[in-house]
Image (cartoon, grey):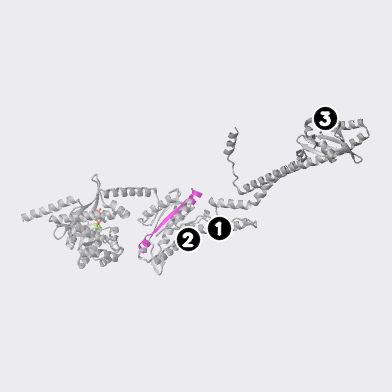
Amino acid sequence: MLHRWIQGLASLKLRRPRSLASRAALLTTTFVVVTAALCATTLLIGAHRESARHQIAVLSDLTIHAATQWGGLIEEGRRDELDRVVGRVIARATVMQVSLHDAHGGVLTERVDDRRGAALLEGLEQRARESGEIAIARSGEGVAFAAPMMRAGRMIGVGLIVWTPDAYRLNAFVALAPFLLIAAGLVLISIPLTAILVRRAAAPLHALTAQAERIASGAELAPIEIVSHDEFQTLATAFNRMTARLDESLRRIQDIAFIDPITQLPNQDRFAREIDFALLQDGSELGAVAVFELQRIAKLRPTLESNAARDLTRAIATHFAEATRAVDKLVAPAHRGDRRALAARLGADEFGVFAPRLASATDAARFAQHVNAALNRPFEWRGHKLALGASCGVALTPRDGGDAGAVIRRARLALGAAHASPARVRLFTPALDREVNARLNLEREMRGALERNEFRAFFQPKLNLATGRIEACEALARWVRPDRTIIGPARFIPVAEENGLIGPLSEAIMREACWKAAAWARAGQPVKVAVNVSALQFRGERFAEGVLRIIEHAGLSPDQLELEITETVALEDPERAARTIRPLRDAGVRLAIDDFGCGHSSLSVLSKLPFDVIKIDQQFIRALSRGDRQAVAIIEMILALASALGMEVVAEGIERREEMDFMRAHGCHWAQGFLSGAAVSAHEFTELLRRQASEEIAAEDAA
Ligand code: C2E
Ligand code: MG
Ligand code: MG
């Protein structure tokens, strides 16, 4: 049972107080209580002993006094009085036995109430008689006194009294009870007092702990004020210094994380946070997120040395921020308060504006148009006048997305469409989203198609106008779906140009064209093959190398291949274009300028690059058919120019015999168009060549 009880006690888990102040208070209280208990015990034991000693002395005096009285009565022979006096003594509750002895030890009188103290009397009377002094014996049973009865200096006998222990044992507890009660009261008062004092002393520590916990839980960093002129104050000062340094470091980290280091404008993360914050504060408020892209600068940047590029970026950022501020004042509604538009740098040549609290979608569009117009005004930098070529896409909060990510994404979608729009500014619409999704689906399908080899070269014949024979062709890309439907390049070439698939796609077409041309040559029907080159492909570092490798693998004579480049591609960077072309021309590959007359600098391109062939764009042939005299003049001029420069001319889009006759009569070399045939599969084209050959043989035979 006891064993179980001890086990139960041991299993009890005492809850330790957590705070330092509570611990100090508990410790002090325990100390006070234990000290008080020890003091009280010591006091009680001491008091008990002292009172016994004092009482015994009193009893001893009493006995001597009685013995003196008894001695007088014995000598005077007043036996009755003696009996009465002894009777009074024995009648006391604290006296157990009284006896009187003569000088020889004989008993004169004896009165016994209680025999418990009898053992004490052993030899006591004799000791008093022989010494002539009082003899004392004490035990748990009581205390016995033997006092000599003296008369005129002579001992006439011995008087004996045996007292009960109660006679000398004063109840010290009872005597000290009031003091003990006062002491206990003081201890009880001292406990809360100690707690209060300790708590007050530890208050600065409390304040410091609370502050540290607040900071740890992410509250704003703030200094703490403690005036205690002790270690706590030193600790608080050190703590404040520490939080100040932490604050400074946090601010620096935020700057690094949220400010663009070159322009000092907020970066994309900060931009997104501000939009999210505005959406959180008032989700129903109309705001505009505009994303601007500076396309001309993107092209100019790679040609600049890095310090100059940084300087230009900084100048553009200032120009952009100023334009935003000016427009903000113009459009800002009165209720906007201090909520101004936020300008940010989102990418190398991409900037953003978030204009909160707008009145309508029209205001949003107006805002974007004004900033875009300001950006497109000629911009002065280091003495040059630059055109930034800015386009802008706008999306609205909260209409176009519940968070910054969604709204910015949609503004970027609108930006993509803005590049192609005449105003260069587009507001996001759900239709745009659908368009983009359709485009993404198409992109996914195209990747699969490329792997399955569904992009094939079709061949459109080119007629040599001098001989009337098909002696060349143009390879045109077609997407032949598994269900045999054929998709034209207008659907997939622009998408491929955007997503980078144009590289592998064009290479596949070029490879097939070269292999087929080589096969026709081997079969004794050589035809020159022209292949279209995209801007992205032409810009590639190893373009020429790749073309030469394909020719070699195919076993095609290089002079049988013609590369068609548009003037925009050729003029992008004429020096680089010349470098790219050189090894190809050295190898014997011919170079044609496609869609001639469509661009703005058709003549200048001729002086910059060594072309072999000019392809007159079909719009001039169409105009020719309409009887447009200007078109006639232009065609005549192109033909004269080509003849002067020793170049061949191909007329594109010949659909009627009159067109072909006109071109032949004016010295054009080649005709390409539906009149002589649209683009057909390699198999059909082979068939066409075979038919031509057999017709020629038949004609020869007939001749
Ligand atoms: P392009 O190089 O100017 O090709 C001539 C376009 O005119 C072809 O359209 C052809 O089918 C069309 N055409 C030919 N004769 C006539 C005619 O008499 N009347 C009319 N109305 N049109 C005629 P297609 O095949 O749709 O190609 C369009 C453009 O796509 C090409 O223009 C070329 O720029 C591009 N393209 C085609 N294949 C490739 C390719 O493999 N790589 C690259 N990078 N671009 C290609
Ligand atoms: Mg072409
Ligand atoms: Mg063309």
Image quadrant in which you'd find residue 535: bottom left
Q: Is residue 299 left or right of residue 176?
A: left
**Vertical relation: 473 (above or below) 307:** above
Q: Are marks 3 and 1 in contact (CB under 8 Å)?
A: no
Q: Is residue 604 left or right of residue 16?
A: left
Q: Is residue 666 left or right of residue 490?
A: left
What separation in Å lies between label 1 and label 2 (alpha carbons)? 43 Å
Amino acid of disc 3: Val
Amino acid of disc 1: Met
Provide the secondary structure element on which disc 1 rests.
helix
| Marked residue nearer the N-terminal end (3 or 1) | 3
Q: Which residue is mark 2?
A: 326
Image quadrant in which you'd find residue 560: bottom left
Which one is in front, 306 or 685? 306
Other-residue count near label 3 (Cα within 10 Å), few / some / many at <14 / 14–19 / ≥20:
some
Question: Could you say where residue 463 lies in the image, as x and y percent from the top left?
Answer: 17, 57
Query: So how many labels did they put on this image?
Result: 3
Residue 393 seen by the camera = yes
Quadrant that contains the N terminus: top right
Which one is in front, 434 or 14? 14
Q: Which residue is mark 1?
A: 242
Residue 628 seen by the camera = no
**Vertical relation: 176 (above or below) 296:** above
Q: Which residues are magenta?
A: 277-300
User: Among all residues in the image, which is located at the extreme bottom?
Assistant: 383
Question: Could you say where residue 673 lies in the image, as x and y percent from the top left?
Answer: 20, 55
Question: Could you say where residue 209 lies in the image, as x and y percent from the top left?
Answer: 58, 51
Magenta stretch holds residue 286: yes
Question: Could you say where residue 589 lies in the image, as x and y percent from the top left?
Answer: 21, 62
Amino acid of disc 2: Ala
Residue at horizontal 70 percent and vertical 43 percent from the top: 37
- Which of the two discs, 3 and 1, sits closer to the camera? 3
